[in-house]
Image: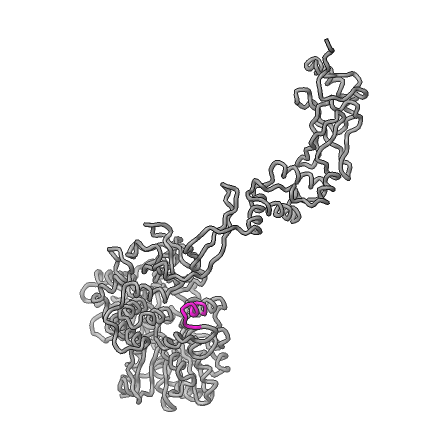
Amino acid sequence: MPLSPLPVDPFLPRIVDHVRRARAVVVTAAPGAGKTTRVPPALVGDGAVVLLQPRRMAVRSIAARIAAERGWTLGREVGWQVRFERRSSPETRLLVVTEGILTARLQSDPLLSGFATIVLDEFHERSIHADVAIALARQAWRARDDLRLVVMSATLDAGAVSSFLDDCPIVQVPGRLHPLQVSYAPGQTVADAAVEVIGAASGHVLCFLPGAGEIRRAVQEIERQAGADVEVVPLHGSLSSDEQDRALQPTARRRVIVATNIAETSLTVPGVTAVVDSGLHKFARYDVDRGIDRLDLERITADAAEQRAGRAGREAPGLVRRLWDARDRLRPHREPDIRRIDLSAAALDVIAWGGDPRTLEWFEAPAAEKLAAAIELLERLGLAAGGALTPLGEQIRAVPLHPRLARMLAAGGGSVEVARACALLTEHHALPPRAVTTASDLLSALDQWSSVPPHVQRVAGHISDWGLRIAGVRNPPSAMGSEADFRRALLTGYPDRVAQRRAPGTPDFLLASGTGATQSRESGVRDAELIVALDVQSALSRGAAGAPLIRIASGVDREWLQPTSAEVVHRFDPETGRVRAVEVVRYDAIVLRERAVQADPETAARLLADAWRDRGPRGDDERLIRRLAFAGRLVDSGDTVELHEHIRTAALGARSLDDISLADALPHALVRDLARDAPDALTVPSGRSVLIDYRADGTPTVSVKLQELFGLVETPRIGRRQVPVRLELLAPSGRPVQVTQDLRSFWERTYPVVRKELRGRYPKHPWPEDPWSAKPTARTKRKPHS
């Protein structure tokens, strides 16, 4: 039976020729051009071909379609392999696999000796597995002169890929199989649009929504509006293989398929002639600083919109309804995984292959800080050290799980319960809310194992087989050992996700990364002070500004936590004015315990000095600083390094803030110079020594009764600059009657007026007409002897 013609068919001879001559080619073609099902079979004449696909669901569908087109037997000439499942034989000439399968094969056979050609399809999706695959495949391609590489995509920067493959040829397949009519309806719901479009289209309708929850709600609404004549089918990665395959089976009944971006590329949903596109998708992102994942709801990119639209034009002229404004400008290309997700699995793949992820020739090198965080996690999990796998890393290298879950599985010692926990986490199975308090949310889920979807149970069986293999036993233990053993195994996979409850009864936690988090209401781990947060959703993904949400937790016993640091912390206590020292033992940012210890004198002095500066000088210290400033020994009101050193020296001998005396810390030479350049006191003619007040404006001031200055003609001057002292002349009551820096002028002009006003008020005090020759005194007039 002849094949139906597709746009790529005339280009097949050229593609084959380029592969044979240059050993590499980049193929770009519009959606529906047929590159996925036509190019790989055209290459099998030169040897076995492995075809990489980014999605598990597409792998089975593509293999089945190729078998049907070629008249081959599925599992014989063409086969497929995904995680935990395969259908192939030694006669298989074309093997369709997910990208991780190829990486595992390259780890065990770096030259990939069983294949002549590697085809990387839909490379534009830039999954992390694709980036690892092309990097490792290129190494094999350079080492083997008979290995060929083909990179294909509908939307791709072909020049960059060609450059990476030594400027290999590029084949561009133009055109689309059928025309599309594109309309825009901003604000319309997917359900309303689907019901409208199915009336105008001749075939099925494929709707794109961002996630399983949105799909579930849309399915219910479409069923309500469309009625019994229309079959509404969900399609997303959380469904079982049978449920996914249901959407791909031909049917004469009108159908609306409501899908995530799983149906964006490669996957052909038969009978579709219309697409409703919400314009949204969910992208996983990893926050390196906080060590948590988040799932962001984002507007799709232009290339994704083109891919989605192409689903409508594969079998007939199609309709596309886009639920955004036609004037909106979308970003041209999607962001590669390597820029946004946790790279620990990729780093482990490269190390297991025998390379260094930091020096590997990547198609696009990851950010150094993200790669460093990934390697640090692998080392903390005990899987890598010194750039190589540890014995434990060698044990789990082939386990098709994230390194965290593989580490949990190894800690489980063949436990079926741990294997089931791994399945729940790797399949992202939504756990039902926990109505009662539990020690572990996963334990509660395992109690209801019979209600878990069959495909999750099948995955658990495969994981259990791996667990037994790691443990070196044939049969699983009759019991998991204890609840504590189970919880401790969970901790081994998430040592960086420990969290501490901030107060009993509160849902508020401190994560080991130092980030605050809130426990969700559906989690049943309500009593434990310490938990391991197995599922933490960033607040950004929830459209909120609050703390991340802990959705799945498991209790942790304090004695399981090995301290990561211990330090003596000194704190200044403002209430007592003293420095207290405690040894703080931490698990990352979590404080495990504290105990009082002897304070380090140097550290205590520094903190006391800091507190002294924050409070500011007082009393004698404030006056001394002003003297130093007047003498030119300080600048900018005394805020100098020299002063700070003096304060710290004074603090060394102090037990509290009030014990600090700056005068005790000044060097002898400075004290001597200060007495000369900024004397502490001024001796007045009465013979009394009067303190000099060095004011904030730098003026030295002396407050003295004017009778004590009789006989003094000129204003006293002090310091090297001979600054005149400002005299506050006091009445006998102590109230200032005059302020002057020109004493001569005061005696000549002002004193007669003052004398006239005050001698009647203070008759016991001397008020001579001639102050120049009068005897200075601080006393009243002497009474005559009787």
Q: Is residue 184 visible?
A: yes
Q: Is residue 298 visible?
A: no
Q: Position of residue 454 (x, y in %)?
A: 23, 70
Specify the segment rendered in magenta.
375-384
> Foreground: 776 or 408?
776
| Residue located at (23% from left, 61% from top) | 220
- 778 to 576, vertically: above or below: above
Give x and y (percent) for residue 459. Answer: 27, 73
Q: Which quadrant holds residue 318?
A: bottom left
In the rendered image, residue 380 lying in the magenta stretch gets the answer yes
In the shown orientation, is residue 523 left or right of residue 10?
left
Outermost residue toward the top?
786
Magenta stretch: helix, strand or loop mostly: helix
Count the marks: 0
In this rendered view, identify the residue nearer to me: 566 or 709: 566
In this view of the protein, which residue sits in the foreground, 388 or 131?
388
